[in-house]
Image (cartoon, rainbow, N blue to C red):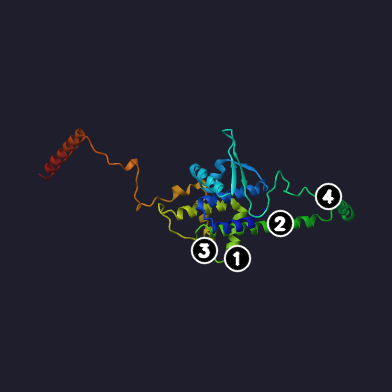
Amino acid sequence: MNYIKEINAFYDWLESNPLPSEAIALWHALMSICNKAGWLSEFTVANSTLQAKAGLSRKQLDRWRSNLMEYGRITYQKSNKVNEAGKYTLISFNSPIVQNGIQNGTQEGTQNDTQKGAQDDLQTLPIVQNGTQNDTQNGAQNGHIIKLNKTKEDIYVIFEFWKNSGLKKHPKITPQIEQQCKWKIEKYGTDRLLESITNYAKILHNENYVLDTKWGLDTFLERNHFEKFFSENDPYSFYPRNKRQPQTGPHLELVVPTKEERDFLEQVYEQQRIRNQQKRA
């Protein structure tokens, strides 16, 4: 499965199948976990992990997981054991997913390819000098290139996620955005940045919270605003509730005093009135 192709296909699919931000965040969290698992056809993940990555409560997780299942984007099998995580399958847009570490359909012709590859390797086997193969340096360079390509993919993922979260738009990935994303990915990882962006977007778009600062992605990362929105920093408590919004709840119910309480208060008021008169006299 190709991460970038899946994300592009997902957002193309969203144009005709709009989903709320919570369901989108959950899909991204599952994509990230599946990626780390090696794109297995079936993987397990705890509810608490998904809640932290997607910024959802348990009730929201149940709701939007069912939503993704109804749209045919995932399958989910609940465990029969109390303390055991459920099993997920991501429905790919582009390609089959790995099953038990083997790509679907790759078994056909494997034996012939293996024998031919082994013969070719014997013919082209490099000479070993002092116990080190000649291609060691080339292997290290290739590994560096793969890491760079992975970082570029992650930068694209972050940029697309920001753009589709209803935040300040950027026409393209500028050198400043690219550099900030690269530094922050190396230090915190892509998943944590997506988690931070998710929480920021939720609070910014919720009229019940006092936050009207619309940062650009470069400023959000450069000035470390993103750290405030990590789940462990509890951003939903950090930003105050909007006092202009009507508040309801048991703590705002009108308390009617009893007759005894009213009589007592009247006595207190009368005594205070007499003392005030004595002071003026």
Mark 1 vs mark 2: in front: 2
**Gap between marks 1 and 3, in whole Å?**
16 Å
Q: Amino acid at mark 3?
A: Lys
Q: Is residue 275 above or below residue 21?
A: above
Q: Secondary structure at mark 3?
A: loop
> Crowding at label 2, few (<14), some or many (≥20) Cα neighbours within 10 Å?
few
Q: Secondary structure at mark 1?
A: helix
- The quadrant of the image that shows the C terminus is top left
Label 2 – label 4 distance at C-alpha: 24 Å
Residue nearest the viewer, comparing 195 with 101: 101
Quick check: 127 above or below 171? above
State the CA–CA distance, disc 4 to disc 3. Answer: 50 Å
Three-letter amino acid code at disc 1? Pro
Q: Is residue 53 visible?
A: no
> Which circle's residue, 4 or 1, is located before the other in the chain?
4
Cα separation, mark 2 vs mark 3, equals 29 Å
Q: Residues within 10 Å of mark 4 (few under 14, many from 20)?
A: few
The location of residue 159, given as percent across then percent down, is 57, 60
User: Residue at 67% of width from left, 56% of height from top?
Assistant: 150
The residue sitting at 54% across, 61% down in the picture is 218
Mark 2 and mark 1 in contact (Cβ < 8 Å)? no
Q: Residues within 10 Å of mark 3 (few under 14, many from 20)?
A: some
**Of marks 2 and 4, the one in the foreground:** 4
Contact, mark 4 vs mark 1 (Cβ under 8 Å)? no
Q: Regarding mark 4 in the picture, which secondary structure is present there? A: helix
